[in-house]
Amino acid sequence: MNYTETPERLALREAVARLAAKYGHEYYLGKARTGGRTSELWAEAGDLGYLGVAVPETYGGGGAGIGDLAAVCEEFCAAGTPMLLMVVSPAICATVIARYGTDEQKSRWLPGFATGAVRMSFAITEPDAGSNSHRLTTTARRDGGDWVLTGRKVYISGVDEADAVLVVGRTADARTGRLKPALFVVPTGTPGLEYRAIPMDLVSADQQFELVLDDVRLPGDALVGSEDAALAQLFAGLNPERILGAAFSTGIARYALDKAVGYANERSVFGAPIGTHQGLAHPLAEVKIELELARLMTQKAAALYDAGDDGAAGEAANMAKYAGAEVAVRAVDQAVQVHGGNGLASEYGLGTMLAAVRVGRIAPVSREMILNFVAQHSLGLPKSY
């Protein structure tokens, strides 16, 4: 494995960073505080091809891999413009459709993913299932040539901006009657699909929603891929989700660390910059080390995924997501501490991130479930749940 990014990816990073800097954290916070959307930034990023770097060239995308899309996501977050829908729409939904969708589904959706014109949410989480995807109660039944979906989903990102939702439901096996997972594309205007915002104590431009599917009737071609292979298809989307989640967190960690280092060099107390004091310098150095380790694991996970090694990518993606979330929490906390009272002042752009970085520890999978995964699959310990 080459631990140095290609000149093409480095150039991509530089270009995305320039675009994100043109908007900056004040633009993002302005949208978040007023309930607005980052539509202008999303549209320009789409026009420039940054959102579609991992979409196959056949459908107008860049034909690159998840590693390049993760680099785009990281640079947006490092500039203080974290767009959560990036983790969902181009990473999960576009990847699943590109890998498993029918030719008709690819032709319908992928060109829009390539330009950013299409946004798609992903709905798996349910009120009573939690991390146990085997307890999902959203069901799909056949009715002639149609599918009829019934169920409820919670904490679904960006539904108000989405053209469709990729819904994880369950169908009954015709032979055994046992329920098995299946994926369906549900356009947001479909009768029977209702959604409402969940009030959150997060300052974010991406809202969370509850979905209710009340006998939502879909055509037969709404099913993505094979009805019998949905579990594999599901994990084909969840590994990119974890990789992009890791990139999201490491980007925020970079933003916070840059703010802390800048302040530590500029703020002078007792006749010298506060960065001369090891009580501040050493924690920042530790954050830097942990950040680079998390970035390296993210690149490894992306490289394994892009090489087609889904099994190894799953382990690495979980580790990367864990490491990224942990360093993001520590970076923001330390950045606030370095700033003292200014760390909670709106003008310094850090206080709102204290709650935001906690999301990485919770979603799309909690740190505890990642530790369960590593204990069982990496260490060979007995299953604990």
Image (cartoon, rainbow, N blue to C red):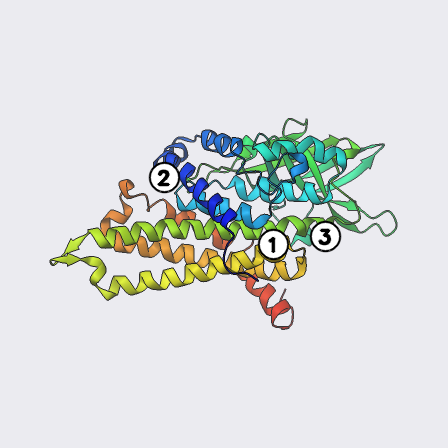
| N-term-proximal mark, 3 vs 2 | 2
Per the image, label 3 sits on a secondary structure element best described as helix
Is there any visible trace of residue 310 in the rendered image? yes
Pinpoint residue 22: horizontal percent, then vertical percent.
38, 35
Q: Residues within 10 Å of mark 2 (few under 14, many from 20)?
A: many
- Tags 1 and 3 touching, CB below 8 Å: no
- 384 lies above or below 300: below
Tag 1 residue = 131
Residue 200 position by quadrant: top left
Residue marked by disc 2: 25
**Residue at the farthest right position:** 175
Give above or below for 136 relative to 296.
above
Q: Position of residue 204 (x, y in %)?
A: 43, 39
| Cα–Cα gap, marks 1 and 2 | 32 Å
Residues marked 3 and 2 touching at CB (< 8 Å)? no
Characterize the local packing of mark 1: few (<14), some (14-19) or many (20 or more) Cα atoms within 10 angstroms.
Answer: some
Query: Alpha-carbon distance for marks 3 and 2?
Result: 38 Å
> Closer to the camera, 119 or 59?
59
Q: Is residue 129 left or right of residue 42?
A: right
Q: Amino acid at mark 2?
A: His
> Residue 177 in the image: x percent, y percent?
83, 49
Does 281 sit left or right of 291 as displayed?
left
Measure the alpha-carbon separation of dots 1 and 3. Answer: 17 Å
Of badges 1 and 2, nearer the viewer stands: 2
**Residue 369 visible here:** no
The residue under label 3 is 232
Task: Tell me whether circle 1 and circle 2 mark residues in contact (CB < 8 Å).
Answer: no
Q: Secondary structure at mark 1?
A: loop
